[in-house]
Image: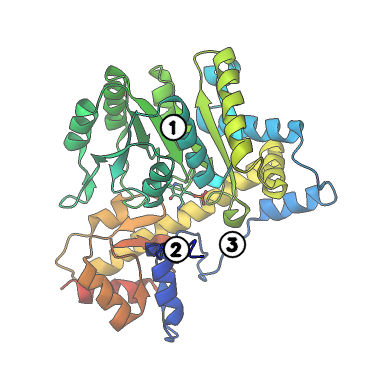
């Protein structure tokens, strides 16, 4: 029978398309600035030493049964402390409903499912632009998706006025997805003062802030600093939700380790919300694989391993920042007539270069440099060795 004859091929994921084109290029000089995964200055993937040390600590302790209640509560407790602050009222009064999730994507998907069950008609507003998968996640969960204006192509910075207008004009009591630091794909984050105004306006309109924290530590090199927007919202009395990923900041990409937390007005409400999240997760994937969860809970609950992690995270963030500075200096040296200030102003793993589709195609065909067609460059692919080549290619295609 023709059960699946009506199924048409799905549209290609833009990032997978870039990787395929990169792999098909036989040039020895090819450079992939498409992938959002950290690379060292040799262009190699990195396994953090704290992860290797945690591996040896947990060796032999790995059971083939599901995650114990003790491991899962340590994991959740230590994860939420990272975002809300270990001395925060939320932690002290145990007002969080926290659950293991399948990395950041799974945490977003679980929250979307929760929304659909308890607020089926309330839209979620996503920044324009945003990580493209946000659209897929909330669409597939059948939550109405809207956009708010975020980025200004002329200034290559925040379109703050439009952002505030869109908060004001959204139906009262909507969900707003916010990137608390290192916005993907633009690298543009609000200033402290702007965050204050965003928080106020969301409060005035009774909107619910949902933070997608995929890069804590990658913007400034400091976990606390990168959580300051969330802390500010807590100070203003918001109830918030947060998807946390350990993919980037612990280099655990393939392990799929994440945490979803939703705040309740008191401990009792948090427990009720948690019971529902757990029920939803159970029907979708029951529980995540145990190995990555053990690694993260081991690192976060051992003071020495945690201190080592914080150091290694800073090394990664510092390398990215120094590559931004170096790319900028190289472009200046070439006397580029264009303004490249955004290369150093934007933060996190990505630089939203402002290059257009033709220029990006030319980078691929003439220079073997690959990135997504929105002009997003992964700074993790830039190294001491290739930075001047990349700068000169960018200069040549943009003049
Ligand atoms: N949110 C954002 C903004 C991201 O950039 C990513 C990864 N690209 C994710 C969530 C999901 O990451 P993961 O599922 O790998 O943790």
Q: Which residue is mark 3?
A: 46
Pick the quarter of the image with the C terminus: bottom left
Tell me the distance, in whole angstroms, between the alpha carbons under discs 1 and 2: 31 Å
Q: Which mark is residue 35?
A: 2
Which residue shows up at 17% across the image and 49% down it? 155
Q: Earlier in the sequence, mark 1 or mark 2?
A: 2
Above or below — where is 1 with respect to 55? below
Query: Disc 3 versus disc 2: distance between alpha carbons?
Result: 14 Å
Query: Residue visible at 25% across and 25% down?
Result: 171
Residue 381 vertical position relative to residue 307 in the rendered view, above or below: below
Provide the secondary structure element on which disc 3 rests: loop
How far across and down, in percent of the image, does residue 274 sit? 59, 25
- Residue 124 at what x, y percent from top left? 34, 34
Check disc 2: other Cα within 10 Å, few if <14, some if 14-19, many if 20+. many
Residue 15: quarter of image: bottom left
Quick check: can you spot residue 182? no
Q: Earlier in the sequence, mark 3 or mark 1?
A: 3
Q: How is the image coloured?
A: rainbow
Q: Nearer the viewer, mark 3 or mark 2?
A: 2
Residue in the image at 41% along x and 66% along y: 9
Please tell me which residue lies in front, 301 or 385. Answer: 301
């Amino acid at each position: 029978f023709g059960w699946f004859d009506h199924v048409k091929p799905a549209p290609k994921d833009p990032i997978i398309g870039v990787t395929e084109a990169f792999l098909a290029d036989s040039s020895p000089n090819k450079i992939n600035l498409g992938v959002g995964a950290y690379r060292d200055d040799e262009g190699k993937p990195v396994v953090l030493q704290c992860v290797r040390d945690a591996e040896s600590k947990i060796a032999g302790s790995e059971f083939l049964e599901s995650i114990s209640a003790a491991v899962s509560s340590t994991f959740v407790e230590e994860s939420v402390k990272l975002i809300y602050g270990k001395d925060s009222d939320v932690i002290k009064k145990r007002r969080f409903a926290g659950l293991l999730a399948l990395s950041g994507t799974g945490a977003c998907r679980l929250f979307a499912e929760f929304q659909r069950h308890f607020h089926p008609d309330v839209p979620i507003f996503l920044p324009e632009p945003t990580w493209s998968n946000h659209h897929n996640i909330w669409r597939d969960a059948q939550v109405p998706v809207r956009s708010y204006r975020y980025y200004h192509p002329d200034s290559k910075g925040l379109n703050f006025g439009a952002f505030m207008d869109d908060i004001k004009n959204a139906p009262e009591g909507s969900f707003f997805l916010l990137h608390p630091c290192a916005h993907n794909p633009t690298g543009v984050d609000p200033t402290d003062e702007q965050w204050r105004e965003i928080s106020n306006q969301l409060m005035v309109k009774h909107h619910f802030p949902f933070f997608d924290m995929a890069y804590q530590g990658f913007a400034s090199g400091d976990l606390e600093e990168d959580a300051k927007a969330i802390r500010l919202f807590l100070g203003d009395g918001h109830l918030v939700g947060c998807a946390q990923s350990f993919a980037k900041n612990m280099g655990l990409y393939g392990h799929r380790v994440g945490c979803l937390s939703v705040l309740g007005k008191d401990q009792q409400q948090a427990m009720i919300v948690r019971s529902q999240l757990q029920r939803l997760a159970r029907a979708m994937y029951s529980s995540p694989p145990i190995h990555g969860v053990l690694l993260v809970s081991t690192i976060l609950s051992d003071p020495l391993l945690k201190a080592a992690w914080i150091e290694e995270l800073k090394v990664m963030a510092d390398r990215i920042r120094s590559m931004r500075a170096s790319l900028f200096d190289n472009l200046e040296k070439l006397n580029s007539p264009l303004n490249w200030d955004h290369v150093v102003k934007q933060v996190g793993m990505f630089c939203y270069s402002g290059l257009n589709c033709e220029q990006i195609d030319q980078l691929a065909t003439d220079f073997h440099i690959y990135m997504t067609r929105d002009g997003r460059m992964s700074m993790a692919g830039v190294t001491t060795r290739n930075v001047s080549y990349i700068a000169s290619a960018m200069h040549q295609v943009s003049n």
